Amino acid sequence: MTAVSVENGLKSSARATRRARMLRSLLPALSLALVLIAIAWLNPRAISYFGFSLMLNLAIPIALATIAQMFVIAGNELDLSIGTFVGFVGCVTATWLKDAPLLGVVILLGSIGVYALLGALIHLRNLPSIVVTLGMSFVWQGMAILILPKPGGKAPDWLLALMAFKPPFIPFPIIAALLIAAVVHFCLMRTSYGVILRGSGGNSAALKRAGWSLLRTKIALFALTGLFGVLSGMALIGITTSADANIGNGYTLLSIAGVILGGGEFVGGRVSPIGAVIGALTLALAASPLLTFMHIPPDWQVAANGAILIIVLAARVLISRRER
């Protein structure tokens, strides 16, 4: 084998790797595009300002919860309490934040502090995050029930006005999703501290040798998870106008699926804020509008969502093998 043939083989392999990486990065957008094409084919009238406003009504809280989960996954951890935490925030928002705003703000800030302490506890005691957050899910659920034993309460007027905002030409959920993706992408992917946060999951040993505190990065990641969990709960109540202790229970699995659907990995600190938001939008569209237009009974919709996720992940595995 000549040197020229070896060089040509290496160039061909490099081009194939670049194509595989590009296809992998475009997979979340392709998934969203396929869902939109299917909706347009089944019900063309849904592709309109009013249609997108209805279909993406719950996309904002789902996207915020997905971003919250993404920060934990960036540190090689997993949060099984984000759904019940969103429900707890919703109960606080619909009661104390409306009737006693100062007390409500203190409680919500305190809950973010609790998340930061969880990050410190998990790191210092080397505890599995799945176990700790699973235990906290019962704590958040119990506190939500104590605050609001039965569905009720009311969102603050300013929150109702914000979530009911109707800009011209482009529906508010799309604008909010673009803003969330842009801000988080810049902070996590384009800043030096964002590199450090991702490095805690990608190569913690190298980060430690460079003199950075893994404890501080873990606290920061969990605090950011708490912050976006609070925003998700508030946005959800701004849309539903009232609260329920169980209102956010489904967000745990949705947030994990959104991160993975958007190109994230459970290990290695490999996450994508833009991909996570796209994954959340895909799930929001596939969870109800698409399956409803396909006349799939509600009892089968959860299984259909799981099938969609499995298909996308299978495609990603094939692309990853080609990349390697």
Image (spheres, rainbow, N blue to C red):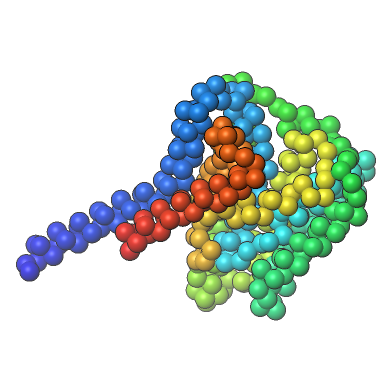
Can you say which quadrant of the picture contains the N terminus? bottom left
Counting from the top left corner in percent of width and height, residue 173 is at 63, 33
Q: Residue at x 36, y 55 (%)?
A: 319
Q: Nearer the viewer, residue 210 or 204?
A: 204
Is residue 16 placed above or below 267 in the rendered structure? above
Q: Residue at x 76, y 67 (%)?
A: 135
Residue extending farthest left: 2
Q: Quadrant of residue 181?
A: top right
Look at 43% across and 56% down and name the residue there: 314
Residue 24: x and y in percent read 40, 51
In this picture, is 76 found above or below 106? below
Number of labels in the image equals: 0
- Residue 227 in sight here: no
Res 160 quadrant in image: top right
| Image quadrant where residue 51 sits | top right
Residue 233 shows in this picture? yes
Is residue 277 shown left or right of residue 215?
Answer: left
Name the residue furthest bottom.
125
Above or below, 305 relative to 43: below
Q: Using the image as rendered, state which of residue 165 and residue 143 is in the foreground.
A: 143
Please provide percent x and percent y for residue 272: 51, 52
Across and down, in percent, residue 266 comes to: 53, 63
> In which quadrant will I find the C terminus?
bottom left
Q: Is residue 83 left or right of residue 293?
A: right
Q: Residue at x 31, y 59 (%)?
A: 322
